[in-house]
Image (spheres, helix red, strand yellow):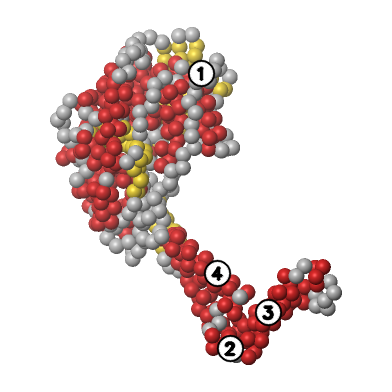
Amino acid sequence: MTDQRPRMVHQRIRAPQANGNVLVEPPLSSLPEVVRKNRQQLSSQLGDFLFGKSLDELRQQAKAELICLARKYTRRYQPNVVNDSGSEPDLPLIVSGHQPELFHPGVWFKNFLVHHLAEKIRGVGVHFLVDNDLCRQRSVRVPQEQPSAHFASVPFDRFGQAVPYEEATIQDRRVFDQFGANVADAVQPIARNPLVRTQAKLLNHASDGSENIGQIFSQFRHAIEGTFGLSNLEVPLSHIADSDPFRMFLWHLLQQAATFRDHFNGSLAEYRRVNRIRNAAQPIPDLAVNGDWIETPFWIWRSDEPVRRPLFVRLQGTDTQLGTDGTIWGTISFGSIDAVVDQFRQLRNQGIKIRTRAITTTLFARLFLADIFVHGIGGAKYDQITNCLMESFFRISPPAFVTATATLRLTPGDPADWDQQIRSGRQRLRQAQYQPETLLPPDVLRQDQVSSACASKREWIDHNLLSPQQTSGLPQSRKAGHDAIVQVNRFLSGFLDAFIRDEQEALETAILAKKRWAVLGSREFSFILFSEKAIRGTMFDALRRG
């Protein structure tokens, strides 16, 4: 059979370097039309897509469930954000997502864009809390200037096992309660009025009555968004993964596990080829086969043992066995889709959780939920694989998505400025070493010794430019000429001692400044280190410029 998998192209996407600049692709002004075309394209899929329903029918059901879940979750802590008006499935949904961590402002910009676009087209913005990802770090990185510029880590908890954010709870409440003040103190005086200090009450409020780290940090950040006037809804991905529309999607892929694995691995192979990646584990590993067990793009774990494991399936007659590491965790018997969904619900009641991996997260979101999905740079690159799966496995043209990020630095500046100073300084010092006469003032050049040395140097240079045949009869060797020129340069550069000393000091200063900026100028610092003024200025100014 001929491979119908669409070909990819290499994408070179980079975050803006200049402080305060943003990336939005397609351009911000075109996004209302992009949303309109996506909605038109997805609603036109009227044939049988899954279980006797069209894609449009499935999307209506999934979108209504999403808005219901997001309103219910958001209302618990941000009741003023929730607006119950509108016919849910008909509202344009602008969706983004990220791990519930204290990410950098470039990631946060997506939420501002989602709100802006939703407001412009009278839609609903929804942010997924990707709580199936691992909580690996229990600290925040901050810049330090003394004794020299370096990174330091401020813990928000005692180090614990890397578990999904859904399961990540505070291990040491004392450390957590001191975290905000410790971060604010550590980042002074580099950052003045950081959000972690000025909005400390919101952090304390978010942590009241909750031990889940991701939930606390995301609700803290969402509460700050409320003070900025943003009205996005939020919902953990775990809540979506426990919904009936998602279980229908899950069941379809499990039933087609072998076929989907072929398409998945083929799409990965094409991505690696286009991007010249030789490591078979990058960007993600292939789905494996272990005997008659087939790996699927989902995680599985138990509530009482929250260790993510890849979900494998084995088809046994009318039964689909679910397991990992050769152990059967559950069995789904073939039947009506309602009966199958109920069996997944029973597994969940037993503490067994099935969650998406990266590709299936955006595959489900873009196919069933979003009218447009807003990615960061990393997600945008990897979602070429998702596009490929939509076309090759689901046989539909993928809807467009948005790539968005911003650059905000605690210490503004342009690394190119330091690079230019360093290059220029090194060139001048080299000139002082090898062409000192070009830097000498006229009054020095007129001195007899200096003018004589310069004339001697020119003679030796002319001599050394002759071919070996031309110089074979001359008593002076080419090495003697080289040595003589070195001596002249040393003599002449002696008149430049002050110049050389100043240039060396300037070069050392530029090198140290660049090293300092490499730390203090990072765009990766958490949003909590920035002031409200800096965040507002970057986010809203960029959206106003459009």
Residue for badge 4: 426
- Of helix, strand and loop, which one carries label 1? helix
Q: Residue at x 22, y 43 (%)?
A: 230
Residue flagged by tag 3: what amino acid is it?
A: Lys
- Mark 1, Cα crowd under 10 Å, few <14 / some 14-19 / many 20+, is some
Label annotation for residue 446: 2
Name the residue located 31 percent from the left edge and 28 percent from the top edge. Answer: 38
Residue 457's disc number: 3
The answer to which of 280 and 271 lies nearer the viewer is 271
Q: For the residue labelled by badge 3, is the local secondary structure a helix, a strand or a loop? A: helix
Mark 1 lies on residue: 258
Which badge, 2 or 4, is on the more N-terminal residue? 4
**Above/below status of 384 relative to 348:** below
Q: Nearer the viewer, residue 254 or 437?
A: 437
In the image, taking residue 488 as reference, residue 122 lies left or right, namely left
- Mark 3 or mark 4, which is nearer to you? 3
Would residue 527 be seen by someone viewing this image from the given angle? yes
Q: Are marks 2 and 4 in contact (CB under 8 Å)?
A: no
Quarter of the picture containing the C terminus is top left
Instruction: Name which residue type carries label 1.
Output: Ala
Q: Earlier in the sequence, mark 3 or mark 1?
A: 1
- The location of residue 539, given as percent across then percent down, is 28, 49
Q: Earlier in the sequence, mark 2 or mark 3?
A: 2
